[in-house]
Image: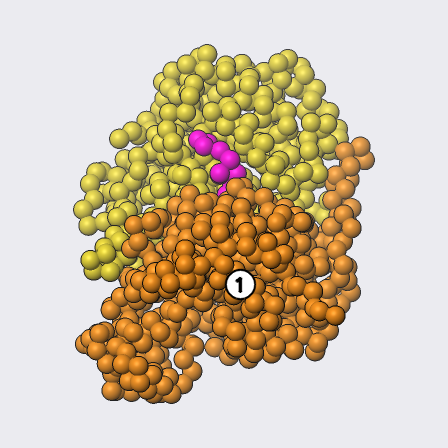
Amino acid sequence: MSSVPSALPSSAQLHLAVALDGAGWHPAAWREPVARPRELFTAQYWADLVAEAERGLLDFVTFEDGLGLQSSHFIEPDGRTDQVRGRLDAVLVAARIAPLTSHIGLVPTVVSTHTEPFHISKAIATLDYVSSGRAGLRVQLTARQNEAAHFGRRTLPRLDAYDSPATQDVVTELFDETADYVEVVRRLWDSWEDDAEIRDVATGRFVDRDKLHYIDFEGPHFSVKGPSITPRPPQGQPVVSALAHQSVPYRLVARAADIGYVTPHDTEQARAIVAEIRAEQALAGRAYQPLHVFGDLVVLLDDDPAAASARKDRLDALAGEAFTSDARVFTGTPAQLADLLQELASAGLSGFRLRPAVLGHDLPAITRGLVPELQRRGVFRRAYEADTLRGLLGLARPANRYAASTTGAAAAADTAANATA
Amino acid sequence: MSKPLKQIHLAAHFPGVNNTTVWSDPEAGSHIEFSSFAHFARTAERAKFDFLFLAEGLRLREQGGKIYDLDVVGRPDTFTVLTALAAVTQHLGLTGTINSTFNEPYEVARQFASLDHLSDGRAAWNVVTSWDAFTGENFRRGGFLPQDERYSRAKEFLATANELFDSWQGDEIVADQDTGTFLRDAKAGAFVHQGQHFDIEGQFNVPRSPQGRPVIFQAGDSEEGREFAAAGADAIFSRYATLKDGQEFYTDVKGRLARYGRTPDQLLILPAATFVLGDTDAEAEELAREVRRQQVSGATAIKHLEFVWNRDLSAYDPEGPLPDIDPDLGEHTIARGRAQVRMYRDPLATAREWRERASANNWSIRDLVIETGNRQAFVGSPATIAATIDDFVQADASDGFILVPHITPGGLDAFADTVVPLLQERGVFRTEYEGTTLRDHLGLAHPDARTNADAGGADLGKRGERVAS
């Protein structure tokens, strides 16, 4: 059974993911000649992107999503017409791509705040079936009032500033709900034991109902009985991930996730964030469970560093303002990026989720420039070594929490974590 | 002048979670692996079928307080598997059953619009309702909905979803790289809906999909269900696959359309139909008898009798006579998570009728259950089945059929290879797909967002011409 060490020597293998969103992460990305802005709502567009990522042997791709139009404002719609607006359901985009690919992991965003954990659990389980074990999810919450109004089931207070105490209270509650949500999703995945389907002709029984389990989750926001209507997915537990910028979300990552995406701007920040997550992990009773911490970076890659900077300047001019991001924005060559990734990895990051500024340009620069560079340095795979996403990430297929005889520290730790959840 | 031949519509129902599906057959494969769904869909597309159909149930069925284990148990998520099937087919329509009780319009509209985009216009929605607290235990809302409000919520749910589909008209995305205008209108997707069940507003975030709206199916058989279909559905998934019952239902429902300003060709009647094929009629009859015995074991027969009796009948011998005691007329408690129990509206009368039929024919409990519930709609040689299907459709007992094979995933193969060519020879079934969308296959107009928007978006009867694109 493999695990993820808390600090990696410089020769350790890096994990690489790419975050897919619209035409890319720069707001003016869609205006580049290489962009295909009229094709953003077609299957072919996404199929081409994921094929490119798979050609580069990446661990997985994530798909952004949201329950309202994109906005440059953190909490409300911006009414802009000069940026990409509108998107397809991320789980379904991933499902559409699954039969066209064979190794790369597919990790759609799901929004916990207004959706049903029962539906999402079976959707991701089914994504795991249609991809033969390559599914994950990235869980996200929303505190936007306008998105709450799309559902009309709850009202959220108007938030004034990103980091005000009132905002923190609201967001903390939404994160607690999200932790419950992930707990329900995970219990439902385990609600069928792997060998529940018996097809016993002699007794006429299709399943052994003693191997189907009610999850009986009760919480302040929802109660879910179970079992799932979908049998346990091929990976047992598809990969759960979340983006985190501060203590409350770090706690969610530590309690509930297999991968946390974090946004350090230098190695010192990376080290501090990793330490905080590891401490929370220990508090949650999961110290011995593998938990990846990936660094998120926006990347603009060119063979000449000046070209990358000039490209960013051109995009900023088109957008009418300098691009800023929660994540560090890197401009430079693939070799310079490789240097940076190895340096950040020394602080305990086990991989990176790269956000290409312009997908049509920076995704191929990752797969055809960065990846060969990392391979030359001996820190990235030269062929896919596993058929499942958990396999690529070095995560064992976990024991079922409801099975009568569970073995291994992971199962024991899991049980302890559940008891404290 | 003789009437022109009607073209038949055919669809394939993935063998599901009920006892028509024979899982014990050596040829029966997985009901969950994607390879089974892909095989089934490819067969349906090879046979030029209109669409594939998936049923849904949001809680595992229980009987006598325990999970029901005699039938296939477990199924994938409908949207996810249908969208994956869009990758391995090019023309086949993709119809999903989605509950209007334990979902919200914004999310379901996003999912159907996304499926329609990702399949290039092949999405369809079988709108079903549910109210029971049993299923509700899996959801945030719980069992909140009084039974008599289920159609009122379903109607408003569909009207609201249509408002969301129509909130984009199809020309909003300019994506002009030179001028920097991506959206023509900052208010794209704007909607406001205030009603009894939904009070929502904002902006829908999926641009108009190729079909504008998914094709809408309705599956209920009640008076309310028939009106719901006449008002707003494109097709009905019915259960009347015999000539006389089919004609009565067909006449009744098509007769309701004029009241909504609709014409008979705007609502297709497609009954579910089981079938058993053989080289000869006699061989098929023999095989069909065998299949029925596989579908209804002694244990299954007792369980099905309990749907009517609403009592524990486990002490009865399935090979013996029907119980003398009467059904329990209290709240139905024995079987949960099943639509069938609602079919028996007068259990005393049903029990009386069944006892009379069993005694007149010398049937055991098992014989009775087989005869009342598991007679296949079509049994015979390919020639016999092709002729029967054609006769039914030409006699206005239906507009086609949703075929329900009893084996997963190969149960449709022989039908595709032997019956379909005969229907094509008769000139009543397509030899190639003529259009690209499911609306094209079904001969339904493409809705125009503007026409509907003018009518407030809630007038389900109005159908415009296809938007020029």
Q: What quarter of the picture does the N terminus of chain A occupy?
A: top left
Magenta stretch secondary structure, dominant: helix
Queried whether the magenta region covers residue A269, the answer comes back as: no
In the picture, measured across the screen, residue A132 lies left or right of residue A150, that is left
Spot occupied by residue A108 in the image (x, y as percentages of width and height)? 50, 42
Residue at left offset 23%, top offset 43%: A412
In the picture shown, does residue B304 fall above or below B27? below
Residue at left offset 29%, top offset 55%: B24
In the picture shown, does residue A150 fall above or below A393? below
Chain assigned orange: B
B467 and A204: which one is in front?
A204
* Residue hosting label 1: B387
Few, some or many C-alpha atoms within 10 Å of disc 1 (few <14, some 14-19, many ≥20)? some
In the picture, measured across the screen, residue B30 lies left or right of residue A315, that is left
In terms of image quadrants, where is residue A42? Answer: top right
Residue at left offset 58%, top offset 23%: A364
Spot occupied by residue B10 in the image (x, y as percentages of width and height)? 55, 58
Q: Decide if residue A110 is in sight here.
A: no
Instruction: Give amino acid for label 1.
Output: Ala
Chain assigned yellow: A
Magenta span covers which residues? A94-104
Spot occupied by residue B61 in the image (x, y as percentages of width and height)? 34, 65
In terms of image quadrants, where is residue B349? Answer: bottom left
In the picture, measured across the screen, residue A62 lies left or right of residue B193, that is left
Spot occupied by residue A79 in the image (x, y as percentages of width and height)? 72, 48
